[in-house]
Every structure is written in C-alpha cells, then in structure tokens.
Amino acid sequence: MEVNILGLTATALFIIIPTSFLLILYVKTASVES
C-alpha cells in the first residue's frame, strides 16, 4: 500500500477544517457567555 500524499493531504484538510471551525465557534460562544 503506497501512501498517496495528495489523498493524505485531502483527508487531513477534510478533518482539520470542520474541527477548527467547530472549535472557533465554541470559543466564540464560550467568550460571549462568560
């Protein structure tokens, strides 16, 4: 099984982008509530 850099990058972005978006959204909500 050879590692496809493009596929690996796409998978990483697919995971990181929504996670960072949710994290930012959570931080904004938490800062507003406090």
Image (tube, helix red, strand yellow):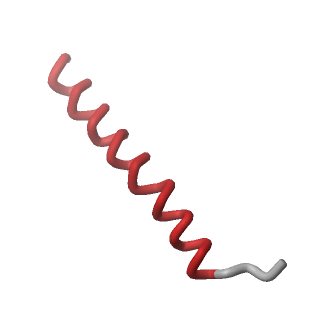
Side of 14 where 20 appears, left or right: left
Residue 17 versus residue 32: which sits nearer the camera?
Answer: 17
Side of 34 where 27 appears, left or right: right
Number of numbered labels in the structure image: 0
Q: Residue at x 31, y 32 (%)?
A: 26
Q: Residue at x 38, y 49 (%)?
A: 20
Q: Residue at x 59, y 75 (%)?
A: 7
* Residue 23: image location, x then y, percent: 36, 40
Location of residue 33 (image quadrant): top left
Side of 19 where 6 appears, left or right: right
Relative height, residue 19 to residue 9 (above, below): above
Residue 28 versus residue 8: which sits nearer the camera?
Answer: 8
Q: Residue furthest right?
A: 1
* Residue 6: image location, x then y, percent: 56, 81
* Residue 5: image location, x then y, percent: 62, 81
Q: Residue furthest left?
A: 32
* Residue 9: image location, x then y, percent: 54, 73
Q: Quadrant of the N terminus?
A: bottom right
Side of 29 where 12 appears, left or right: right
Relative height, residue 3 to residue 14 (above, below): below
Q: Residue furthest top?
A: 34
Q: Quadrant of the C terminus?
A: top left
